[in-house]
Image: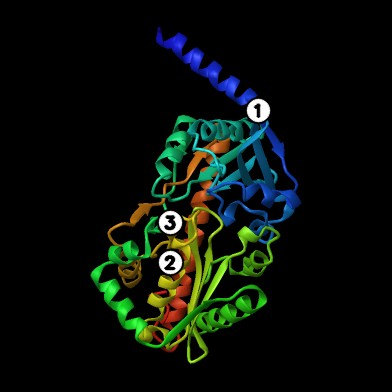
Amino acid sequence: MPALQQAQQTQAEIVNDLDNLESKFVPPSKWDEIAVQFRDVLHEQTECFNALRWPPHQLDRVAFYKNGHLVSAAVILKMRFPVIGGGIAVVKWGPLWRPKGRPDDPKNLQRTIDALKQIYALDGGYFLSFFPRADPEISGIETQALEQSGFHPGEELASPDRYFVNMDLSLKGLRESLSQKWRYNLKKAEKNELSARFVEGEDGFKTFMQLYNAMIDRKAFHDTSAINTLQALMDAKEPALRPLILIVEQNGEPIAGGVVDASGERAVYLYGATNNRALPLKAGYVMHWEISKHLVAAPHVRWYDLGGADKDCHLHQFKRGFVGKRGQISVTPRYYHFGATLKVRALGHALYFTRRKKGEFARILHDYRNRTKPAQVPNASRQA
């Protein structure tokens, strides 16, 4: 078949696919019941998380259907440029495209990206960006789909490595997967008479936040997290979206805590907190092991995402040892962008450049201020 004819046929197939993919804008009150229908659900694609992060007018929620069946969905953050016109639209760690109870269909991912490109970049005039998730199995499929849709890779995270512990193992298999040093430290921690329990609701939230706030004050930590959303997540309408909170205690006193999003097949370690006693007692080892015991028993969870290490060599060693032989260290993909015109592309890239430099300056300023303060108590949460 001649190349031109083949290209025309391919374009026709894409148009037909888009015609068969029905998009529906979903009200905020209905979004989370849609999000929990996907195996790849994460808090960044939920209403209970985003409602506290952004003004209502900046968020769209779009669900896509094919032949009446839900196939994909995405939360889109929009920001318009004043005066000069245009703006940016961002899909963070989305779209959701892997419905529960059905095999993965990368064609639906491709159709969804093309549909969002049509709605926001071509029709809406936005500089459309995707922040693909790090995933041991899915990242390559998603970045390939973005490139096939004409998106171009942009910024890379300063510390792109993410650490994944394999939960698709027996407890015995998981323990054997641990590095020798990690397993040794876990054995030592288990002799320290520590207890661990999951605490639900307001009690769990209050206990964890007492540890967390004390840790932040003690370490003068530059906290850019979304910790202010935790209480709303604990009260989420959909039970599956409520995080797990594990508290480690010694003689009834909380010394460490961890918060985990286990709503999808990739459980994510969201927040950790410790006091001064946690490090010598190796409480971080007990905490993560007890979380893992729970996740191994959850049939829908395949990976435990520990997050990154932010150039912290101690944290890298801890997480690498926990990942062990059967886990994986994956690289978070670069951001992917598409702008339909030169003006839109120039404005979009300028905004991301400014955003990156602002973040770098804020961190440098914070580090400088810390150097002028009296010495802080040693970091007791590195291992958590």
Give the secondary structure at mark 2: helix
Q: Is residue 121 above or below residue 181?
A: above
x and y, in percent, of residue 383 in the image? 38, 75
- Drawn side of residue 321 relative to residue 252, left or right: left
Q: Position of residue 177 (x, y in %)?
A: 29, 62
Instruction: Report the disc number at residue 303.
Output: 3
Residue 177 shown left or right of residue 91 in the figure = left
Of the residues under marks 1 and 2, which one precedes in the sequence?
Answer: 1
Nearer the N terminus, badge 3 or badge 2? 2
Image spot of residue 190 (x, y percent): 36, 82
Q: Nearer the viewer, residue 99 or 78?
A: 99
Left or right of residue 106: residue 17 = right
Residue occupying the point 54% across, 18% down: 13
Q: Which residue is mark 2?
A: 292
- State the residue position of label 1: 67
- Whichever of labels 3 and 1 marks the residue nearer the N terminus, that label is 1
Q: Residues within 10 Å of mark 2 (few under 14, many from 20)?
A: many
Q: Which mark is residue 341?
A: none
Image location of residue 189, percent across then percent down: 35, 82
> What residue do we see at 61% from left, 44% from top?
74
The image quadrant where one finds the N terminus is top left
Disc 3/disc 2 C-alpha distance (Å): 10 Å
CA gap, disc 1 to disc 2?
A: 39 Å
The residue under label 1 is which amino acid type?
A: Asn
